[in-house]
Amino acid sequence: MAASYDVVAIRSDLPALRDVTYLNFGTEGVMAESVLAKYFEVLGRFERYGHYERMRIVEHMQACRERVGKIVKAYASEVSITRNGTDGVSIVLGSFPFQEGDELLIGGEEHPAIVYPAFALQKTRGVIVRRFPFHHDPSQTLRAFAAALTPKTRFVAFSHVSCETGIRNPAKAIISIAHARGVPVLLDGAQTIGCLDIDFPDLGADFLTGSAHKWLCGPKGTGILVIRTDKLDSLTPAYVGGGSFAEGFPWDKLGEPASVTFEWAPGAARFEYGMRNPATYAGLNFAIDHLDSLGWKSIHSHQRSMTEDLKRRLGAVPGIRIQTPMSWSDSSPIVNVAVEGVRGRDVSQKLWNDYAIVQRAVRDPDGVRISTGYCTTTADHDRLIQALTVIARTN
Ligand SMILES: Cc1ncc(COP(=O)(O)O)c(C=O)c1O
């Protein structure tokens, strides 16, 4: 970590963290006051002046695609700003030309963001959903994945990092196996974008989705969809509106829409149809600029060293079980921890109610999920470990 990474200074811009111990960047991040002030300024002016202001701030939209593209090493034209992580998955799965009987292979630890759109396809379009398990050992995951592919597999969608265990999957190898069979892949990066270094071209995924309100600490209700340039036209947008087409209004007043040849708008922004609030794009730009100014390498190494330290310390507490791989290359800043004999839901409630420690319960494997952010300190982890020790002892 760079010597200049000053977490005390970083937290002085996050005064709310004096009230709570915040360990849930995997659900929603927290916005720094300096970012919030700029975001509110733009939002306030837009709300007050309406379309007059929109003309002044509209360039934030393209600037946002550029910033997000830079983070994942994609072209801005490959980036669409969505409303959340689920939105991107739903857009891709809903727009892909599945036929009845096609198989959609998804991971075994998926968020409803993948599970629900997948099962909706099963129910409404006769797509067969199959699953492959995630293992702590990546070579086992690879074997399980290869074994689950069949001649009918038409599409693969899985999480780079599991939101349940924090397992980091061997995404590049999985994608390359799928591609060798001619099967396109959606990589869910909700738990990677902003907390691990992501190289979209190197990973090779056809589609990458994620949330911008988690690790990037952008405005709540912002998400990311990245589509490889050569895959753009493999989707027939299921949802369209203003912004979807190259021409704003491609027929004259009396023409019949059906007789017109539509041309999709260039780039992934074709999926940002209808009214989008440019102030949220501005807010995301400010959030990214803030993290950028701290340095991505420093942020990632802070999160890594803090997470490794947490695991080491938790491992020494009697009655506590870590349900996340210990090796960094197979894990992430997410740690699933269980207290022997106490349901995750109950541990989570106690941490929340008695200690104001913000985290989340996980159902399978039963435990609580801790996510270490760019501003987490050893003192945050001290409070967590003390609380878990008491819960384990008094159980
Ligand atoms: C792996 C994963 N995918 C997708 C999502 C959904 O993201 P959003 O809440 O932005 O729709 C989440 C949210 O927690 C997640 O953990």
Image (spheres, helix red, strand yellow):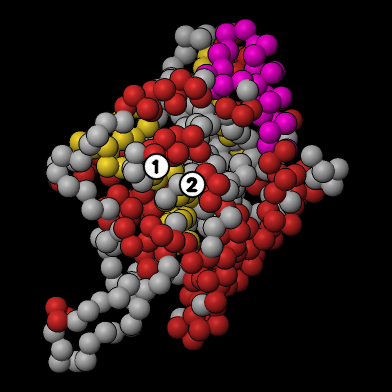
> Pointer 1: residues within 10 angstroms few (<14), some, or many (20+)?
some
Kindly state the secondary structure of the residue where label 2 is placed: loop
Instruction: State whether residue 73 is above or below residue 128.
Output: below
For the residues labelled 2 and 1, the Cα–Cα distance comes to 9 Å
Q: Position of residue 237 (x, y in %)?
A: 28, 62
- Foreground residue among 12 and 95: 95
> Position of 150 compared to 383: left or right?
left
Residue 228: percent from the left, percent from the top? 44, 57
Query: What amino acid type is highlighted by mark number 2?
Result: Gly
Most extreme residue toward the right is 3
State the residue position of label 1.
Answer: 179
Residue 241 in sight in this render: yes
Magenta part of the chain:
302-326
Is residue 353 visible from the viewing direction of this image? no
Residue 17 position (above or below residue 64): above
Rendered residue at 69%/56% (across/down): 292
Q: Secondary structure at mark 1?
A: helix
Q: Position of residue 35 (x, y in %)?
A: 65, 60
At 48% from the left edge and 75% from the top edge, which residue is drawn?
47
Instruction: Identify residue for label 2.
Output: 204
Q: Which mark is residue 42?
A: none
Crowd band around label 2 with a 10 angstrom C-alpha radius: few (<14), some (14–19), many (20+): many
Residue 383 lies in what quarter of the image?
Answer: top right
Q: Amino acid at mark 1?
A: His
User: In the rendered structure, are the residues bearing label 2 and label 1 in contact, judged by CB atoms less than 8 Å apart?
Assistant: yes
